[in-house]
Image (cartoon, helix red, strand yellow):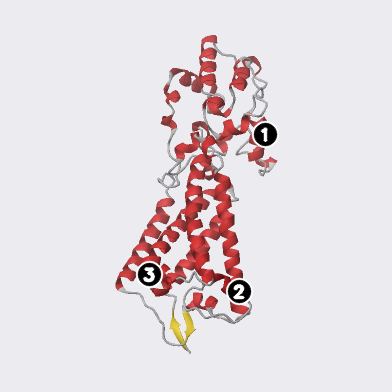
Amino acid sequence: MTKSYIWTFVNRFLHVLLIVTFLLSYLFSDFDNLFYYHALLGVLFFAIIAFRIIWGFVGTKYSLFKDFQFKGLAKYLFSILAIKEKHIGHNPASSIAIILMLILGILIFISGMLALGVEERAGFFAKLYFTYDVFSYIKDLHEFFVNFFVFVVVIHILGVLIDKFYNKADALDSMIHGYKNTNINESVSLNIFQKIFFASFLLFFIALFFYLLYPKNQIIGIKDLKYDFSYMQNEDYSIYQKECGSCHIAYVSYLLPKKAWNNIMNNLENHFGDDASLDEMDRKAILSFLEKNSMEEFNTKFKANLKNENVNEIAITNYNFYKRTHRKIPEEVFHSTKVKSRANCQNCHQFAQEGFFSKSQII
C-alpha cells in the first residue's frame, strides 16, 4: 500500500468553507439582529456551490463529475456494515449526496433571494414585495430546501462516521490531510490553469464578501424604493406627512385597512386620548389619500395577514399579525428609553416611514 494525494487543498478548503458558511447562515436566521449576515453568508455559500460545480468540470481527477460513481448504490448501502469495495475518489453514496447538495444549494439560494425580496423588500427581487400573494409560499419553500439539505448532510455524516469507526476506512482522514491508502500511486496535483482559476475565485470571494458588507449593495442590500410610489409625490401625501408626521411618523398607508383609516380620520378629536382635530379641507384630503392607498390597494404581506382580522381596529399594534411578528421581543424593550412605545416603529425599523420593516435593517 502507498499513500496517494487524492484531495488537494482546493477540495479540502471548499469543504470547510461550505460547512462554515452554511452552518453560520443557518444559525443566524433565528436572530433578527444577525439576519443580514444570514443573507450575506447565504450568498457566499452559493458562490462556493457555483465554484464547485465548475470545478467538477475543470478540477483534478477525483473532483470531476465524470469520475463520480453512481452505479451500485443499492449494493453499497446494503453492505454498509460489511467490507466494501474500495473507492479512491467518491463512492456511490457520497457521489449522489454531493449532487443532491449542489442542486439543493442552488434551490436554497434562488428561493432565499426570492424570499428576501418578498419578505424583506431587499436584494435583486425587492419589487416582489408588492406581489406577495404570488410568492407567499416562497419562505416555506426556502425552509423546505434548507431542511432537505440538512437531512442529506446528516445522512452523509453518518455514512462517513460508520466508514471511519466501523469499517476503519480513511475517507474522513483524507478530507483533513488529503491522502488515501492505495495499491499504487494515484496522486493528483494542480496544473497551472487550476491554480490560476482557484486563485481568481479566492480574490472574487474576498471582494464579494466586502461588497456584501456595503448596506446598499445590489445583491442583498436595501434599495431606496421610496420614489417607486407615485402617491408619495402628490399633494395629499404632503398634507398627510406635514399634519400627521408632526406628532409621529407618517405611517405608510398600506399598514392599515380602509375601514381603520376611516375610523381614525372621523374621530380625530379623540385620537388615542388626544385632540388631533384638523382643518376640514386637510382632513378630507388626508382621508382621501389614506383610503386610496390603504392596505387593500397594495399586494403585500400586510394585506395577506390582516384581511381576516377585525378591520375596525385603529391601532396597528393591536392586530394579531403585529403581535405574532413581535412575540419574541421582551416587553421591557418596548418601554426602554430607546423605543418608549410600541407605536414608535422607527426606533427599531430605521426605514419604517418609507415602508421598510426588514429584519436585516433593525437598529
Residue wearing tag 3: 59
Q: Is residue 348 above or below residue 228?
A: below
Residue 312 vs residue 340, the one in the foreground: 312
Q: Residue 36 location, x and y as percent? A: 51, 49
Query: Mark 1 — residue?
Result: 320
Task: Work out how far the residue at label 1 is from the one at label 3, CA to CA, in angstroms.
Answer: 54 Å
Q: Is residue 200 above or below residue 41?
A: below
- Tag shown at residue 202: none
* Residue reaching furthest to the left: 192
For label 2, the residue is 161
Q: Position of residue 105 (x, y in %)?
A: 49, 57
Amino acid type at image mark 1? Asn
Tell me where residue 176 appears, x and y as whole percent.
50, 76
Mark 2 or mark 3, which is nearer the start of the sequence?
Answer: 3
In screen coordinates, is 302 left or right of 129? right
Q: How many angstroms separate mark 3 from mark 2 (CA)?
A: 27 Å
Q: Secondary structure at mark 1?
A: helix
